[in-house]
Amino acid sequence: MDRDLINVLVLGVSFMFLFTSFQTNGFIQGPMIDSINHEYGKDHYGANTFVSMCLIYLIFSLVNWIAPAFVRLMGARLSMIVSGVTYILFIANFLWPQAWLLYIVSMIVGFGAAIIWTAQGYYLTICSNEKTMGRNSGLFWTLFQCSLLFGNIFVYVYFKDMTGEDIPHSTRTITYIVLTIVGTIGIVTMFFLGSPKSLRSEEQDDQQGSFDVLQSIRESFALLSTRRMLLLCVTFWYTGIELSFFSGVFTTALGRINTLDKDGGNAKKFVGLAGMIIGIGEIVGGLIFGILGSKTVRWGRDPIIILGYFVHMISFLLIMINFPPDSTISETVKQSAYIDPNLVIALISGFLLGFADSCFCTQCMSILGTLYADNSAPAFALFKFFQSIACACAFFYTPYFNLYIQLAILAIFASMGTLSFVIVEWKLRQQNDQQHIN
């Protein structure tokens, strides 16, 4: 098997294990913190999941400006290993719940996230070429999003017989011990990442061993000053808003709508199931776009982005009619939805959210790896900067804006992000056609 393909598969497997831990926590963190607050009292604990998420993505966004310098200093593999440890620290903090500790490790993992995703983007790019970038992005995305499937299968099976409105202390402890162990396996897997065959020794020397923060910032600003990157940043911003919605807001709101559980009146048991369905949507999308990677080169990326746009619009409509508007701002839902909340519709909405997210994210990685193959680290850093700052903003306003306002914001930025991406893709296609003519 091709060495670069093996590297992409190992990269995907390592992220699958690490983010089985982190992304599973993202779906259950809201209900977990609600339960801890009910057990210990808000005066003793008093943490807020949206404050934690906001801190993560705020630090994530700021550190992205200097992340390429860290990747140059340590190299892609070591950068991912060291950054992976910050994720384990974040997960393990729930074994000793303290609000101040949660907020500290939230900032630490935000720092690590900026480094690991910049390193991942660079490593994926040097393992790919123009013909394989679409395939490799799809394969990585599929393996990465298997984390949503496996982690949430565990949560659903473990939580399904739970009674009462809260998650017991013993259940929380076992859950986070398992997630910590699984995340550690992901870090160990990263040690098996090899050197890409396309990376010559002199290139490796250039990319590793220097640490110039100012150079990193200058390179990022130089890219940001181009019309092409400015247009793509609108799409990046949208991916951040929708990331916050499906990874934290959607499942937290679902867990508060106890009328979804016709038997015991505890919808928190369905959070793991919803996360699993979102993961299936992500995996299906990643598989399709991985298998059709060669076709994407010929047809362009814009049809996939447009498909993701319409799928997102359908999911937003289903959520609007199925979820009460106060489910995002109140732990006790008092308002009514347009229809009686239905679990099947909620799960269909989750699948569509996952599938549409894979449309946007795989094509963003693909276009960056194609356009900036020779300067991928700052390009991916900008992607993650705008995605994470948008995510932080969304988590900040979530406790204050009801569901309908948040869906309206999503719809507006989805339209803007889709249009800007299509413009860039069409311009790129025109340039390629002109080169072939000449």
Image (cartoon, grey):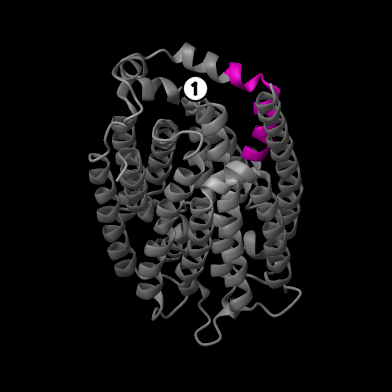
Q: Position of residue 283 (x, y in %)?
A: 48, 59
Viewer-nearest residue: 188 or 399 = 188
Asked whether residue 1 appears in the rendered view, the answer is: yes
Residue 221 left/right relative to 277:
right
Q: What span is colored magenta in the figure?
A: 221-236
Q: Position of residue 126 (x, y in %)?
A: 40, 30
Q: Quadrant of residue 405?
A: bottom right
Inspect the magenta stretch and tell me whether residue 226 lies in it. Answer: yes
Q: Position of residue 66 (x, y in %)?
A: 46, 22
Residue 125 left/right relative to 432:
left
The residue positioned 31% from the left and 46% from the top of the image is: 10
Label 1 Cα crowd, 10 Å radius (few <14 / some 14-19 / many 20+): some
From the viewer's perspective, is residue 265 above or below residue 92?
A: below
- Provide the secondary structure element on which disc 1 rests: loop
Disc 1 marks which amino acid?
Answer: Asn
Residue wearing tag 1: 375
- Quick one: quadrant of the C terminus? top right
